[in-house]
Image: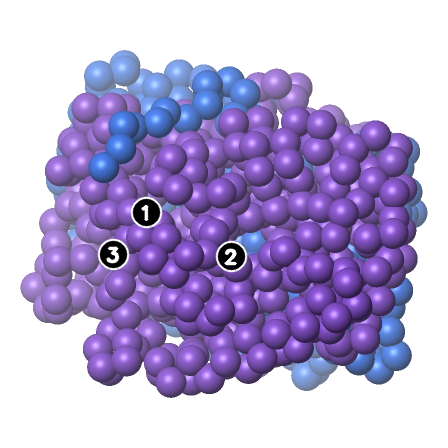
Chain colours: A purple, B blue
């Protein structure tokens, strides 16, 4: 139809926007919509999870897919974590570039370009990865050999999530044997994560789900030990269940992610006594500005689906009990409330789901006592390669 | 708790990752998950919408919130558009930086920092903006005067969307009068967009919704003309309804966005004859790789909620009629299908909702005949400031 018109030069057009805040600003000066982190609450969450793991005698390897920030990963490690998990090679690269020296990609890596990057990364850090397929083990071995590195490989087993991971003990043992005998690879143990259990509302449902996962993991482990293959690590458990995995006597490592921030959906989980799940504090918020109040009993804020993930429900409004965030458009959020907020008023919103909300933003604005203390890039933001 | 650990230096850590493809690559070489644009289909969509506007005798001002790409905006303008709409000042800045010289921010801008950026932008391009509040008109005037520029201001009226915009004719006229008498501002007309009508499934429902919007717009226009305030522009209409606005005799301009790409949700609209809405072609896809097939009748691909927005339903799988994308995790998509795909196989997915899907990615991969022709940055990606 028409001659192709190229985009602008890379260097300029691909830089994310400047941070929405600078150290020392008040919340009224922060450009919105902005991703706020309450640093006091964040630090208490970090300490609490480190205490939980320490008390149970398991390793803590928090999931960096939640925050995608090496700065935050280094705080977790300073608080006692052995390293981090990632879901993507690009996330692992961002973590290593930001000073993290021990990364488990708790996921299958298949593409040859990704395998090449993964193996290269093992020259700069201790790198582990999961597999659930024998041809994939061979591909991992080839990549490791091509770069002269060693990759630690865990067999992912399905413990009820019905996503990745092998279903049978026999297949798991066969994979472990293949890993152990493959040049450039070492067999590290089992990845055994039951995702859906994290968000089961009732305590007893979560407990039973993890009991089943523990049983399946134990079966595989016992067979591996009987076959002389060893099983140094069994890793899994998210924010909703990791107290169960930690005290199971079978898991050796937990991988919670969301505990650093929490969200509205996790909060709807119930504790053993039926109260809401409040082990960790809400530390993540989206700061928004009222941009229209032309209609009665309604205001519109400047944070919609491109600032808040709505996959797990609408955000909650902080500090205004009568206000409800009822509808998210792409760039607008509609709040119903009796009375009204004024144009330019700021509201703090609790995201429904923290991970995909963080992934929409380029910057964290770290706040203490309503004053900006720092900004951090969401360094590994994106779909991840 | 612990000493604050700063993030890595800005220059390195905030650059988005390299593009997932290079010109000349085959689809098998593209790193996934990648946002593909079928350039042939895109160009046909651009031409079709330009023809529709031309035939109806209205101006075409496509919405750049969909694509966030100056390269794409320039293609739209080359095909006949008068300029673009944006929702955010940061989007408008990216468009002007990328060579677009006529931008309507089809939204209310309230924050003082944003108003300052908006007014400064008017030194480099023709800038218009909407308002639905008299104090906001004064703030726009102050910003324009501070920078010695002229801003064209449209009054946003509520035509049934119940979001931004004034409800009464009297308020609209009062705002128009204030704009017309404010230094640094000129009154441009009306913003009259009915968002929810775009996705009403039945043709007749959309037609009636727009009929109501047209009626409200006409009422306001007639009063403005009677008061001697003029009403040069009445702008609105998205991909689902803009044929109605274009032929209404009242609207002078249409603002469709999604037509460039289409998505699974728009496709579920019905035409007058009851068939699916196929006026525009699907040109946007997410390319994903099979990363696990360890379980029966299920494969897992590497594109979940961080690569595909699921607010309007799950993506569709192209070319495999028996396959259904049944569940999106943050980084995984679970496909059910009889038989199986092999590890490493590529699948093309049609996003449920194009705008927020694009907003997850840093790069477009432009493809013609299954060969990469170009990559474009999603230059204005992000929540927008």
Where is mark 1, residue-wise? A46
Q: What mark, if any, has residue A253 been given in the picture?
A: 2
Image coords of residue B82 (percent x, y): 57, 36
Characterize the local packing of mark 1: few (<14), some (14-19) or many (20 or more) Cα atoms within 10 angstroms: many
Q: What mark, if any, has residue A281 been given in the picture?
A: 3
Callout in the foreground (2, 3): 2
Characterize the local packing of mark 3: few (<14), some (14-19) or many (20 or more) Cα atoms within 10 angstroms: many
Residue at left offset 35%, top offset 80% = A203
The Cα–Cα distance between marks 1 and 2, rounded to whole angstroms, is 16 Å
Image coords of residue B76 (percent x, y): 66, 39
Residue at left offset 49%, top offset 69% = A249
Can residue A190 be seen here? The reply is yes
**In the rendered image, which quarter contains the C terminus of chain A?**
top right
Q: Is residue B100 above or below residue B351?
A: above
Residue at left offset 24%, top offset 47% = A44
Compare marks 1 and 3 and give the one earlier in the sequence: 1
Q: Is residue B84 left or right of residue B289?
A: left
């Amino acid at each position: 139809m028409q001659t192709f018109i190229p985009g602008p030069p890379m260097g300029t057009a691909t830089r994310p926007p400047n941070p929405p805040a600078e150290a020392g600003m008040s919340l009224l000066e922060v450009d919105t919509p902005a991703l706020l982190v309450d640093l006091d609450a964040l630090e208490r969450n970090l300490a609490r999870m480190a205490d939980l793991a320490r008390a149970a005698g398991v390793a803590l390897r928090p999931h960096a897919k939640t925050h995608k920030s090496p700065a935050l990963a280094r705080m977790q490690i300073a608080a006692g974590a052995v390293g981090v998990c990632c879901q993507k090679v690009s996330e692992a690269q961002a973590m290593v570039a930001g000073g993290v020296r021990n990364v488990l990609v708790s996921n299958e890596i298949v593409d040859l370009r990704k395998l090449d990057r993964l193996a290269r990364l093992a020259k700069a850090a201790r790198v582990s990865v999961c597999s659930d397929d024998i041809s994939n083990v061979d591909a991992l071995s080839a990549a490791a050999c091509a770069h002269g590195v060693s990759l630690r490989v865990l067999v992912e087993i399905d413990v009820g999530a019905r996503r990745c991971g092998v279903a049978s003990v026999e297949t798991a043992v066969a994979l472990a044997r293949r890993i152990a005998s493959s040049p450039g690879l070492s067999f590290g143990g089992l990845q055994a994560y039951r995702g859906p259990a994290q968000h089961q509302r009732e305590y007893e449902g979560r407990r039973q789900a993890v009991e089943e996962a523990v049983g399946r993991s134990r079966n595989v482990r016992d067979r591996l030990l009987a076959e002389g293959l060893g099983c140094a690590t069994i890793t899994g458990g998210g924010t909703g269940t990791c107290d169960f995995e930690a005290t199971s006597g079978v898991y050796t490592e937990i991988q919670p992610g969301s505990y650093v921030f929490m969200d509205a959906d996790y909060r709807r989980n119930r504790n053993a006594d039926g109260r809401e799940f409040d082990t960790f504090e809400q530390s993540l918020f989206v700061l928004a500005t009222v941009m229209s109040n032309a209609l009665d009993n309604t205001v519109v804020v400047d944070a919609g689906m491109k600032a808040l993930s709505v996959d797990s429900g609408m955000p909650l409004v902080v500090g205004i009990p009568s206000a409800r965030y009822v509808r998210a458009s792409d760039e607008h959020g509609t709040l119903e409330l009796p009375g009204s907020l004024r144009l330019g008023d700021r509201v703090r919103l609790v995201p429904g789901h923290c991970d995909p909300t963080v992934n929409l933003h380029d910057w964290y604005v770290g706040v203490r006592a309503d004053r900006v203390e720092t900004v951090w890039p969401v360094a590994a933001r994106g779909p991840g390669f």
